[in-house]
Image (tube, rainbow, N blue to C red):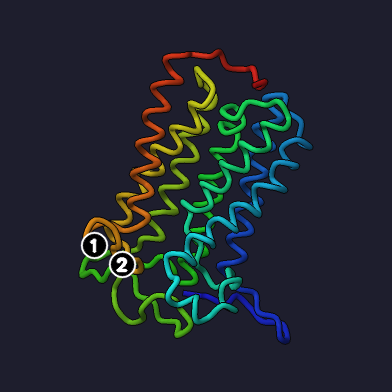
Amino acid sequence: MLPDLLSVGPITFHTYGLFAAAGFVAGLVLTLKIGRSSGIGGHLLAEMAVYMIPAAIAGSRALYVMMNFGYFSDHLSDILKIWQGGLVFQGGLIAVMLTLFWYVKGHGLSFWDMGDLWAPAAALGQAIGWVGCLMAGCGFGKPTGSFFGIVFTNPHSLAPVGIPLYPTQIFAAAGGLGLTFVLVRILAKKQFAGQVLLWYLILHSTISLFIEKYRGDEPAALLYDTMSVIQGLSLVILAWAVISLFILKSRGRPTGDIER
């Protein structure tokens, strides 16, 4: 594909980094639009984003570094090179949810209602980010002989070159885009606070578990090497979200009240 978009003197614009940034911007714009229609001030959401976006990047990178500690322990200077790929979404998700919880506690807001507002943005941002991953070759799939396999040819690609691979990045991008539309629909008709956020976690985790079956870049590391770290985290998040959904649905707090 195209890991490096262009170079201007000593500066190289990496495609992965540009798409990741575009994903954050698109997610923020979507949330501002949703917030405006719900009567929530843009300044409040923008302030949240100031904390949540760095948390997403740091959490995603931290988990990736931990998963590849053997390499980074010998290449410490590479830890900050996120423009070359290497963000694990589940790590960013956990960091963002903790940051959001901290923020709303200090501002007398509802964690669940704010999570509902940001959930479609997370799905959209991830979908766009996966396009950058496709360009860089990260998150590549296992070798395949099927007709829809893709072949990376760029020598700077992070994926193996010259062999057909499952298009896991395309699977993930399409799943994220479809999930965005589903969540916007749920948001328009939600019946209780937290419904959108929890359905996001349920559906995203399910999509992730499916895609992980075809990933070729992450070795299995859990349960006697039968499950990857991402699969393990996805299962934990999925179970927590399903249980929380039933609990919140039984409480049935009316929507429209963003106060804690």
Residue at image point 53% right, 27% down:
187
135 vs 241, nearest the viewer: 241
Q: Is residue 102 above or below residue 226?
A: above
Q: Position of residue 95 (x, y in %)?
A: 56, 48
Q: CA distance from mark 2 to mark 1?
A: 8 Å
Task: Indicate which disc, 2 or 1, sits on the residue closer to the N terminus.
Answer: 2
The quarter of the rendered structure image containing the C terminus is top right
Which residue, given by chain and number where applicable, does mark 2 sit on? Answer: 219
Q: Position of residue 120 (x, y in %)?
A: 54, 39
Dot 2 falls on a residue whose secondary structure is loop
- Between label 2 and label 1, give the one nearer the viewer: 1
Q: Is residue 149 above or below residue 104?
A: below
Dot 1 falls on a residue whose secondary structure is loop
247 vs 213, nearest the viewer: 247
Residue at image point 45% right, 41% down:
179
Question: Of the numbered discs in the image, which one, if any, rests on residue 252?
Answer: none
Quarter residue 188 falls in: top right
Q: Position of residue 237 (x, y in %)?
A: 40, 41
Q: Position of residue 160 (x, y in %)?
A: 36, 78
65 displayed left or right of 118: left
Residue at image point 63% right, 49% down:
26
Tell me the amino acid under the disc marked 2: Pro
245 displayed left or right of 6: left
Residue at image point 47% right, 64% down:
64
- Say whether marks 2 and 1 touch (CB < 8 Å): yes
Decide: few, some or many residues near mark 2? Use Cα within 10 Å; few <14, some 14-19, many ≥20.
few
Decide: few, some or many residues near mark 1? Use Cα within 10 Å; few <14, some 14-19, many ≥20.
few
How many marks overall? 2
Tell me the amino acid under the disc marked 1: Asp
Question: Of the numbered discs in the image, which one, if any, rests on residue 225?
Answer: 1
7 displayed left or right of 98: right
